[in-house]
């Protein structure tokens, strides 16, 4: 490899040791501190003294796809193009998932490092991310969800279940994330990749608040695998795609603003289209309800007046027009509709009440998507040098810190 590899206008040094970046879906500092305080995460606790522990900003909307892709490209959605899990494709005239690599506008540093001669491995919990993370990657890339279907031709590896030594996990379980961590440890010893990216699922965080038994059990499991990665000599960076907050009233009922019902009442049907970018194939634990929405509006509706009217709704934190939102959140203006809305910490946004099946919510709703879930940990197991105290750190600085600033 060359000494400096430039990817998306950022320079990265060749790794001096295996670099493992872990995106813990739905994690926030409160989960980590609670687990450390309970004595179930001693390795993570040790990093307060021996590593580097920062608080960073994730990408808004605080959803899985835009943040994971930002982490592996090192740039915001305005550059890489992925601004949600789901959006309205104006060229197709259809609402679609943003899982197809054709929506990427920037290459990943994973693919660039592999092209430069590095050995690269990627393991993601859900298969929805695999094709985006593995776009043009000459290396190992598979999902825990479909670990029984991997092949050398498609995934760069085979016999994953035998290698990991765990059964195929349910997509709605903590086991899905454990399979990711167990894969990472096995791959580090077996393949010794130069770069490895591990991405988990937020199934536990949607159900369990920081400090609860289920949450602490999850972080205890994670702590054990991180310790093993450390013992194997890896430079570890732990960050998250977003935090998580309770989105319900004291009686446990969800706090929901049904935007499409509201707009249809104001303007009639087919005059507006509300898009919920949290939408993905796995809605059991959140009912496709998050704290961020975009709206496409008919030309005859006065945008400024509508923005002002929406801003007055209780539970709404921010309403911005397309270009203001694109500039404020570093988003691709052509993919976010005419209006962007963000709700407050305890409130979620829906389309129409009849479109959301909440029957599978067996605990009070916890979700994400807004500014209130933007703060995430950015932790390294090594000391870093030269990071300005004035620098606004982002979760997508993970590889930058690991490769350019580790002492």
Image (spheres, rainbow, N blue to C red):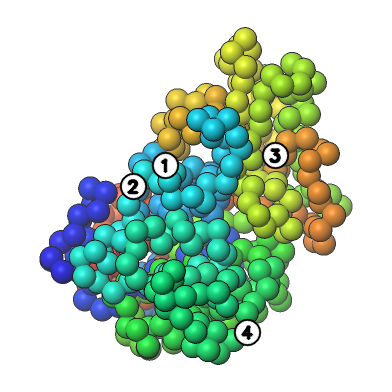
Mark 3 residue element = strand
Q: Are the two marked residues, 2 and 1, in contact with CB atoms closer than 8 angstroms? A: yes
Distance Cα–Cα, label 3 vs label 4: 37 Å
Q: Earlier in the sequence, mark 2 or mark 1?
A: 1
Q: Which mark is residue 167?
A: 4
Distance Cα–Cα, label 2 vs label 1: 8 Å
Q: Which of marks 1 and 3 is nearer the N terminus?
A: 1
Q: In this view, does 155 lie to the left or right of 336?
A: left
**Residue that numbered label 1 is attached to:** 81
Q: Are the two marked residues, 4 and 2, in contact with CB atoms closer than 8 angstroms? A: no
Mark 2 or 3: in front is 2
Distance Cα–Cα, label 4 vs label 1: 36 Å
Q: Residues within 10 Å of mark 2 (few under 14, many from 20)?
A: many
The residue lying at 58 percent from left, 71 percent from top is 146
**Residue that numbered label 2 is attached to:** 106
**Residue that numbered label 3 is attached to:** 349
Q: Earlier in the sequence, mark 4 or mark 2?
A: 2
- Picture quarter with the C terminus: bottom left
Q: Earlier in the sequence, mark 4 or mark 1?
A: 1
Residue 203 falls in image quadrant: bottom right
Distance Cα–Cα, label 4 vs label 2: 35 Å
Q: How crowded is mark 3: few (under 14 residues within 10 Å), some or many (20 or more)?
A: many
Provide residue 265's location: percent of width, then percent of height: 80, 21
Q: Residues within 10 Å of mark 1 (few under 14, many from 20)?
A: many
Using the image as rendered, state which of residue 179 and residue 88 is in the foreground. Answer: 88
The residue lying at 41 percent from left, 31 percent from top is 327
Q: Are the two marked residues, 2 and 3, in contact with CB atoms closer than 8 angstroms? A: no
Mark 2 residue element = loop
The residue lying at 66 percent from left, 69 percent from top is 171
Q: Is residue 358 left or right of residue 173?
A: right
Provide residue 82's location: percent of width, then percent of height: 46, 45
């Amino acid at each position: 490899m060359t000494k400096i590899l430039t990817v998306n206008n950022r320079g990265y040094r060749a790794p001096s040791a295996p670099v493992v970046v872990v995106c813990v879906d739905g994690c926030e500092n409160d989960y980590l501190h609670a687990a450390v305080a309970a004595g179930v995460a001693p390795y993570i606790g040790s990093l307060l003294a021996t590593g580097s522990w920062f608080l960073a900003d994730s990408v808004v909307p605080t959803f899985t796809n835009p943040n994971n892709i930002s982490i592996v490209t090192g740039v915001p959605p305005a550059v890489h193009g992925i601004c949600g899990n789901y959006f309205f494709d104006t060229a197709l005239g259809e609402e679609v998932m943003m899982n197809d690599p054709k929506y990427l506008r920037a290459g990943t540093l994973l693919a660039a490092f592999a092209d430069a001669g590095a050995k690269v491995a990627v393991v993601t919990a859900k298969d929805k991310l695999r094709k985006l993370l593995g776009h043009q990657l000459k290396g190992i890339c598979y999902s825990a969800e479909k670990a029984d279907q991997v092949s050398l031709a498609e995934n760069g590896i085979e016999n994953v279940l035998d290698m990991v030594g765990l059964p195929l996990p349910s997509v709605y379980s903590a086991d899905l994330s454990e399979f990711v961590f167990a894969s990472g440890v096995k791959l580090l010893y077996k393949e010794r990749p130069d770069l490895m990216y591990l991405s988990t699922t937020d199934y536990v965080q949607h159900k369990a608040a920081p400090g609860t038994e289920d949450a602490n059990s999850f972080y205890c499991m994670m702590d054990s695998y991180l310790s093993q990665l450390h013992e194997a000599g890896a430079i570890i960076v732990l960050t998250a795609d977003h935090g998580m907050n309770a989105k319900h009233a004291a009686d446990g009922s969800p706090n929901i603003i049904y935007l499409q019902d509201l707009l249809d009442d104001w303007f009639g049907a087919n005059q507006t289209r509300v898009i919920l970018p949290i939408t993905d194939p796995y809605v059991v634990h959140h009912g496709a309800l998050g704290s961020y929405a975009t709206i496409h509006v008919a030309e005859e509706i006065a945008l400024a007046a509508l923005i002002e009217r929406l801003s007055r709704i209780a539970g709404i934190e921010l309403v911005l027009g397309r270009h203001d939102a694109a500039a404020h959140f570093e988003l691709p203006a052509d993919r976010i509709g005419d209006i962007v809305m963000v709700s407050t910490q305890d409130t979620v946004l829906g389309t129409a009440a009849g479109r959301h099946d909440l029957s599978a919510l067996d605990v009070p709703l916890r979700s994400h998507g807004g500014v209130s879930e933007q703060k995430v940990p950015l932790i390294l197991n090594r000391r870093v040098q030269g990071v300005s105290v004035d620098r606004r750190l982002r979760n997508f600085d993970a590889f930058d810190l690991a490769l350019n600033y580790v002492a």
